[in-house]
Amino acid sequence: MRHLRLSVVAATSVITLAASSPIYSKVGGSQIAGHASASPLAARADCSRETALRVGRPFFRDPSSGGNPIGQVLCGPFAGPGSEALAVTFNAPTCWSPQRWVIFRFTEGEWRVALDQSAFIFPLAVVGADLRERRPVFRSGDPRCVPSGGSRARIWHWDGTRFTAGPWKQVTPPDPTTSGYFKTPSGNIACDYQTLRPPYVRCGIKSGLKPPPPPKRPGCFRTNRISLGVSGRPRLGASICPGDDEGDAGPFAGKGVAQVLDYGKAWSGGGLRCTSAFKGLTCRNRSGHGFFLSRARWRRF
């Protein structure tokens, strides 16, 4: 009888130990606590950057280019209460990144695409159980990477079947001075500028800058241009030709006539400032660096 009691106790202990041990799902090695007598266990999703790299591979802009194709990785119940969803933004090797984002929903033990959006975007934001998307606004005539219309945002919400978007709302106002160009009254100096991503002003003189190579044709600024950013010293390079500011060719084609910066007047934007004078044009940045240009001479400081 004593041996029988010991056998019963040992068997009970084994059952108790097995019931209290954690069970690992086959998906991502997630740990799920439970009991052997409980109902069948659903596999839990592995919401991680490694998963984003794996499931997001078909959405990479150029899988062979290397680098870091994944931007944000956001996890949450975006597809309804108790759901598991993965929002991923994808980087692109261009002037504006990211340019695509996808929401994956964990269903029947695997990640499935629930929403696919291609567009220039700012970082996504989580709002409760929803996602907030913000995009730049491009106005007519804006370069591909220099939007001037501010930004707008909308909320994506799961309606029980699919993701639906709310109305667009303007977030930041348009910038009237995002990009453009100006010249001195003599027409000897022409500049173009951009005040966003990143700000710069670039100027050239008809007589050519030295020591860069001479113009490739008379009166052309080609390879004889100086560029200034919001910090650091100015650099030489790029190209612009007289007449470009009139809209006949080059980067100013179709842009109309350049603004004339009268002597004694100044242009400013994006932490940069240029002052026009009869003796020449002086531009400075926030760091105090800049350049002086005139038909007779030039210098950097």
Image (cartoon, rainbow, N blue to C red):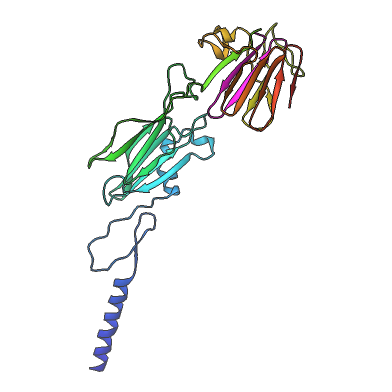
Q: How many numbered marks does the figure carry?
A: 0
| Residue 110 visible in this rendered orientation of the protein | yes
Whole-percent x, y for residue 262 in the image? 62, 12
| Residue 224 visible in this rendered orientation of the protein | no
Return the residue nearer the eye: 8 or 211.
211
- Which span is picked out in magenta? 187-207
Q: Is residue 190 shown in magenta?
A: yes
**Residue at x-position 58% and y-position 21%:** 193
**Residue at x-position 37% and y-position 58%:** 30
Image quadrant holding the N terminus, namely bottom left
Using residue 261 as the reference point, say whether residue 178 is left or right of it.
left
In the image, residue 257 above or below residue 83: above
Whole-percent x, y for residue 61 in the image? 46, 33
**Residue at x-position 31% and y-position 46%:** 129
Q: Quadrant of residue 232?
A: top right
Whole-percent x, y for residue 174 in the image? 44, 25
In the image, residue 87 above or below residue 209: below
Please, which residue is most extreme toward the bottom here?
Answer: 1
Using residue 291 as the reference point, say whether residue 253 is left or right of it.
left
Return the residue nearer the eye: 32 or 139.
139
Image quadrant holding the C terminus, namely top right
Q: Quadrant of residue 28?
A: bottom left
Q: Is residue 48 shown in magenta?
A: no
